[in-house]
Image (spheres, helix red, strand yellow):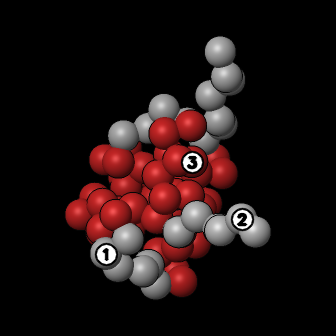
Amino acid sequence: MSKEQPLGERIRRARLARGLTARELAKAAKVDVGTLYRIERGSCNPRPTTHRKIIQALDKIPKLPEV
């Protein structure tokens, strides 16, 4: 049985796969960088609107090709 990764960890991995800093993603998603840090660490859950903003920002930035 595989355990699903926490939301914050999935967001962090997606951000890193696109070569973004937390500050860059926060700016693209129009959320506070401190909020993004807390979400990635799992110390808070994003509101649905914040979650949507982050996902939309990630969708606009292509994933880096694997080397």
Residue on which disc 1 sits? 43
Name, please, the residue furthest toward the right: 1
Q: Earlier in the sequence, mark 1 or mark 3?
A: 3
Q: Which residue is mark 3?
A: 14
Quarter where residue 26 is shown: bottom left
Q: Nearer the viewer, residue 45 or 26?
A: 45
- Residue topped by disc 2: 2
- For marks 1 and 2, give the CA distance: 23 Å
Crowdedness of circle 1 by 10 Å Cα count: few (<14), some, many (20+)?
few
Give the x, y percent position of residue 39. 38, 69
Residue at (65% x, 35% y) in the render? 63
Q: Amino acid at mark 3?
A: Ala
* Badge 1 or badge 2: first in the primary sequence: 2
**Quarter of the image where the N terminus is located:** bottom right
Please tell me which residue lies in front, 63 or 9: 9
Query: What residue is drawn where x is 65% and y is 68%?
Result: 3
Can you give x and y, in whole percent of width and height, for residue 17 in the image?
56, 37
Earlier-in-chain disc, 2 versus 3: 2
Q: Residue at point 42% right, 49% down?
A: 25
Front-most of residues 7 and 1:
1
Name the element at disc 2. loop
Mark 2–mark 3 distance (CA, rounded to whole Å)? 19 Å
- Amino acid, disc 1: Ser
